[in-house]
Image: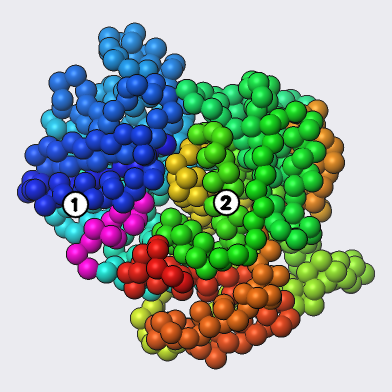
Amino acid sequence: MCGIAGIARKGGVGDGDAVQVQKMGEIIRHRGPDDEGIRRGERYVFAHRRLSIIDLAHGHQPMGNEDGTVWLAYNGEIYNFMPLREELLAKGHTFQTRCDTEVLIHLYEEEGPACVEKLNGMFAFALFDENKQQLLLARDRAGIKPLYYSFDGTAVRFASEAKALVQTATRLVSPDPRSLVDFFALSVIQEGRTAFEGISELLPAHVLIWDTSGQPRTTRYWQPSYATKTKLAGDDLTDAVSGLLTDAVKSHLVSDVPVGTYLSGGLDSSVVSAIADDYITGLNTFSAGFIGEEKVDERAYAREMAASIRSRHHEVEVGPGNFMGNLRKIIWHMDEPTLSPGVYPYYFLCGLVADSVKVVLGGQGSDELFGGYPRYRMALLEADLSDAFHRGRMVRLAGLLSEYRRRYGLGGLKNGLRRLNAGDGRRIYEIVSGFHPRRLPGLFTDELKDKVAGYDPMGVFYDSLSGCDSPDLIDNMLYNDFHNMLPSILRTEDRMSMAHSIESRVPFLDYRLVELAASIPSSLKVSGDEPKLILKEAARGKVPESIITRRKQGFSAPIDSWFMGALGGEVRGFLLDGPAAERGYFDRRYVDKVITRALEKKKDIWRVWSMVTFEMWCRIYADGEGPDNPA
């Protein structure tokens, strides 16, 4: 995997731009320690950092075409590059390397910006066409590979990580107040904004074109349909899912360096590992566990799966030692605060992987395609509650209320009852929300509320959800998770792997499998209390039944016991004293209440985590402390 950065300027680039781009490349050196390159044209400067995976001796970037009129800085892997190469050879193109980079250049010569529609892979790239004096930025369909940019009216600056733009800016970049609200309302940032004011993320399946005059234009080139349902059923559908997944994993194994797989002990990583084992002799598998935390430690299942495929299995144990120091490094790499505590063990897991292989496959994306999260069943249960209530079926309603309370507690039941008359959009918003809409205003100070007056995160959420072309409740939830929730998971995948200079691949997000999954009726993915129905059928015969039938646990960290132990006092001081108390974002009494509820009653622990990661992000970036200051 690689890192890219650059500037395109309307009036032409100068020496200062070249120096800035060189520094941007150095900031993201961890993304590509094997090689570096820079290309300066009249109106652009590109930098590239290479992690060599295919054709190790060649593939230096930025790379140009034969006459030097098209220049490319590219990050990613195109899994169908060999058939594309054959097509281009038939059309008269010649090749000097075996790299997919060169395929992309010649494909652009044939197709222009529409070349992205023929690519199956993960990618983010910048291309400058000197004949047209035009900059093209592009990102893969699922957003596996990142790309950030800013535009000041005269120049577009871009990079694989936002920190490269932030740390070469002429001033400290301020937090975006709307993004702050989004993060605590929904745990994600909407509309392609970032935590940094003035820096945007190119959305998945989008291209940006700028002809060095006017405004950059962004266009979406792909979107899966949830309304068009497949006619396949039964064994034919199971075989189709199994066949596409097998083909995706096989294509993701192409590499000139050693390849392994993550193995958490869950269904997704297990089926990927099982398929990979069919094509790799002596497969290396990797898992993480927690010191003294058997209840959340999944290594027993990972070991069972590793034994069944006879892989070379590796483990790392993670504990709370030097928590704040480690978290500082993690959030520096992430560029943004994060909701999921899973980022913490993931950092150490990637370090373990880096000791043995350079490429690793995982199971990310499966939950968003096949309905793996518990919230899908919560939504279905609420829909049944609402139906029974409005039809006056009191006996059924009483049974459903009892079941809802059993699963989600009295507090959850109260929220569910408040949503009896809610539309699907409102129901989904509240189910996926971070701080509940009723609680959110209490978190913020009047000063911050004034700054975001008129901004409605719920309205933005509804606008995004309107892009789903199916009326089905679960289809809408899957659409939201794929478009809004998955990007934050992929950010973790990319940043933690790149922090250790390894390439992480996600075969579930092969766009053909995404399209097939979207077309499967939701009842074949989630039904009653059973998630991932079709995927479980496809996994049978590959994965032990004990792993197929076990309840989903999720890859996280035991921050409840960590925070309620020795870390509790440190966390309280971190959030209530010093810089945190002076920012003017949060009502101090409300924060104190949330912390007390978490540390004394084991409630709202993940809300405390989100505040801790936000404050750490502020210290690193808004305060300019960087990754190495003592926390």
**Location of residue 96 by image quarter:** top left
Foreground label between 2 and 1: 2
Q: Quarter holding the N terminus?
A: top left
Q: Is residue 164 magenta?
A: yes
Q: Quadrant of residue 91?
A: top left
Identified at 85% across, 69% down, the residue is 406
Q: Is residue 585 left or right of residue 187?
A: left
The spot of residue 79 in percent (x, y) is 47, 26
Q: Earlier in the sequence, mark 2 or mark 1?
A: 1
> What label does residue 348 carry, if any?
2
- Left of 564 or right of it: where is 572? left
Residue 537 in the image, given as x and y percentages of width and height: 78, 34
* Position in image of residue 193 (x %, y %): 38, 60
Reading the image, the residue beneath label 1 is 20
Q: Position of residue 470 (x, y in %)?
A: 59, 48
- Taking 228 as reference, is 394 left or right? right
Q: Is residue 414 left or right of residue 204?
A: right
**What are the residue bounds of the magenta stretch?**
161-171
Please tell me which residue lies in front, 601 or 221: 601
Please identify the quarter of the rendering in which residue 94 is found: top left
Residue at the extreme right of the image, as rendered: 395
> Disc 2 and disc 1: Cα gap in Å?
32 Å
